[in-house]
Amino acid sequence: MRAKTSGRPVPEAIVRSLTDHRGEGATQLGLVVDIGCGRGTTSRALAEQLRPTRMVCIDLAPALLADARERAGMHRDVRTEFVQADFHHLPLADGSAESVVAAFCLYHSPQPERALAEIARVLAGDGLAVLVTKSLDSYREMDALVADAGLDPRAEQHESLYTAAHSGNLAELTDTSLEVITTEHEEHRFTFDGLDHAAEYLATNPKYHLPPGLYGNPSALAEALHEALPEQPITTSSVITYVVARHRGGRP
């Protein structure tokens, strides 16, 4: 996030999508569900700005849920639950959620249609879903950097992390279970001020087949980059796609 030079903060864009499509005069939200909540950045924005009566934050990783739970104090007036669960089997009743958010998580599924069907099942008849993903060619300049440094010569040939659910197919996937209201694409640009800064991102990217000792070790990775490449800023980009959807025909 320190490298971002253009593009709206994603949590703010999600909140805006929900408020714009709920319309003026909408009553207080009931249950809001944040699927793939990660460390709770979007969850916090949803709670603080929408003030639902209840919020359920779901992730499969216990460590991420623990991080999200630490932020719960930011919105103590919203009844919030943190649930470890698979998004193919949501532990929620049919039609129980007024809003469902799934940001940067559907591409982790080999069958995202199953996760979307679960979202449709738990979404209330007049509820809204906001789904967010990235473009297939996201951060391609970073792929070239890793390849040019000789750390992973095939970096540019590896399959995109976003193959299962990306900017080009998310609306189509969503249409299998829900009615798509809007699809919005927005370019986000990032400038890393040097190789040390880039290494902070690259060391945690699972796309690359890095030599032993470099994955998860930004300082060692930065040293390897400096040995192979001249110091330089790196600019890269990604298209972020927002799909807003509802039950077909709206209210049953």
Image: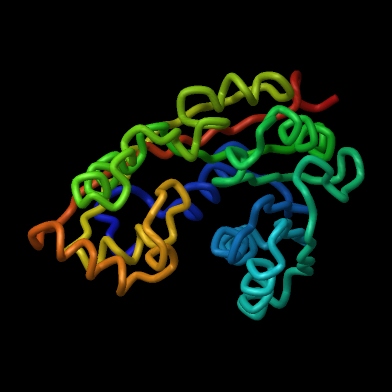
Toward which corner of the image does residue 218 lie, by quadrant?
A: bottom left
- In the shown orientation, is residue 86 left or right of residue 13? right
Toward the left, the furthest residue is: 230
Q: In the rendering, at what x and y percent does residue 227 appear? A: 15, 64
* Image quarter of the C terminus: top right
Q: In the rendering, at what x and y percent does residue 45 appear? A: 56, 62
183 or 66, which is in the foreground?
66
* Image quarter of the N terminus: bottom left
Residue displayed at 37% across by 50% down: 8
| Above-or-below relation of 244 to 252 | below
Number of numbered discs overlaid on the protein picture? 0
141 or 45, which is in the foreground?
141
Q: In the rendering, at what x and y percent does residue 109 appear? A: 66, 38
- In the shown orientation, is residue 64 left or right of residue 204? right
Q: In the rendering, at what x and y percent does residue 208 appear? A: 40, 48
Toward the front, the furthest residue is: 212
Which colour scheme appears in the figure? rainbow
Residue displayed at 46% across by 35% down: 241
Residue displayed at 16% across by 65% down: 226
- In the shown orientation, is residue 206 left or right of residue 124? left
| Above-or-below relation of 48 to 210 | below
